[in-house]
């Protein structure tokens, strides 16, 4: 192998174009599922989902984003004993301040 030749190759799906079917699926799931869940279903990187959603003009409401963040906090709390309990309807900030 030549000195300046790459020692690795790209993954077969790296930078592949989005199909219309994938875009339709993203439109259908956007705002109803987390970015992580959408990425898993589409077999796409998590960081690519919001970028394509913006290009398609998709937005999430503030409430949807808050619910998504609260779910992420619940999952993180399940992994550690140091986080306070988050009650339904309580913001993560309130839970930390009231702990």
Image (cartoon, grey):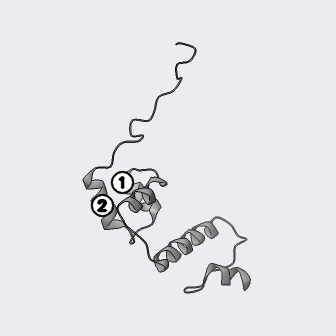
The residue under the point 36% across, 54% down is 42
**Is residue 54 visible in this depiction of the protein?**
yes
Residue 94 location (% of width, % of height): 67, 84
The residue under the point 47% across, 28% down is 9
Q: How many dots with numbers?
A: 2
Work out whether residue 9 or residue 96 is closer to the camera in this orientation and state it.
9
Q: Quadrant of residue 51?
A: bottom left
Q: Quadrant of residue 15?
A: top left
Residue 66 location (% of width, % of height): 53, 76
The residue under the point 63% across, 79% down is 92
Q: Against 79, is 43 above or below?
A: above
Work out whether residue 65 or residue 96 is closer to the camera in this orientation and state it.
65
Task: Tell whether label 2 touches label 1 (CB within 8 Å).
Answer: yes
- Quarter of the figure with the C terminus: bottom right
| Label of residue 66 in the image | none
Rounded to the nearest angstrom, the CA distance separating label 1 from label 2 is 8 Å
| Left or right: 69, with 83 as reference point | left
Where is mark 1, residue-wise?
42
Among numbered discs 1 and 2, the one appearing first in the sequence? 2
The residue under the point 47% across, 60% down is 36
Q: Against 94, is 1 above or below?
A: above
| Left or right: 19, with 3 as reference point | left
Residue 75 location (% of width, % of height): 57, 68
Where is mark 2, residue-wise?
25
Label 1 CA crowd tier, 10 Å (few <14, some 14–19, many 20+):
some
Mark 1: secondary structure:
helix
Work out whether residue 16 or residue 82 is closer to the camera in this orientation and state it.
16
| Left or right: 57, with 99 as reference point | left
């Amino acid at each position: 192998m030549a000195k300046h030749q790459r020692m690795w190759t790209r993954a077969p799906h790296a930078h592949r174009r989005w199909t219309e079917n994938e875009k339709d699926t993203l439109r259908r799931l956007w705002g109803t599922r987390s970015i992580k869940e959408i990425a898993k279903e589409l077999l796409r990187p998590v960081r690519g989902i919001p970028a394509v959603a913006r290009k398609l003009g998709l937005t999430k409401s503030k409430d949807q984003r808050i619910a998504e963040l609260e779910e992420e906090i619940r999952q993180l709390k399940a992994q550690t004993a140091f986080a306070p309990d988050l009650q339904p309807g309580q913001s993560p900030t309130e839970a930390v301040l009231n702990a």
